Image (cartoon, rainbow, N blue to C red):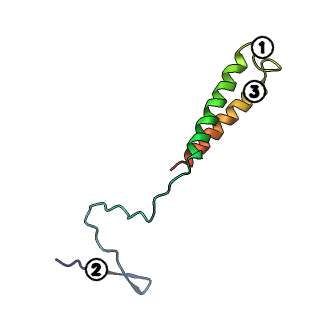
Amino acid sequence: MARKTSTKRRGGRVTPRAQESSGRYTPPIPREQKVSPPWVPALMFTCLLLGVAIVILNYLPHVLPGGTSNWYLLLGLGLITAGFVTATQYH
């Protein structure tokens, strides 16, 4: 059975109306698969683990030079953030 296209008048112009869909979803055909280089997950896990280690070591007495400091916390949280940002780039 052929589908009919109808027209609709807009401001004196006749424009074709969109065809009715069948209700079934057809996913688009992927043009190419994106593949991340192997260093992306390595960098992601390195940043995450190093950031967590720095935050934990900050609270242990006399482990990091200079003692407990907010700068170590900022460095650790920055590395964790960099790990999450790298994770969003992984395909």
Residue 18 horizontal side relative to residue 77, left or right: left
Relative height, residue 68 to residue 78 (above, below): above
Camera-side mark, 3 or 1: 1
Provide the residue designation for mark 3.
72
Which secondary structure, mark 2? loop
Image position, residue 48 (x, y; %):
61, 33
Considering depth in this image, is 21 or 30 the residue closer to the camera? 30
Provide the residue designation for mark 1.
62
Residue 89 horizontal side relative to residue 1, left or right: right
Provide the residue designation for mark 2.
5
Which residue lies at the image location 45% right of the left edge and 63% below the top edge?
A: 32
Relative height, residue 66 to residue 25 (above, below): above
Which residue lies at the image location 78% right of the left edge and 28% below the top edge?
A: 71
The mark tally for this picture is 3
| Mark 1–mark 2 CB contact (< 8 Å) | no
Q: Amino acid at mark 2?
A: Thr
Q: Earlier in the sequence, mark 1 or mark 2?
A: 2
Which residue lies at the image location 29% right of the left edge and 80% below the top edge?
A: 6
User: Looking at the image, which residue sits at the far front?
Assistant: 38
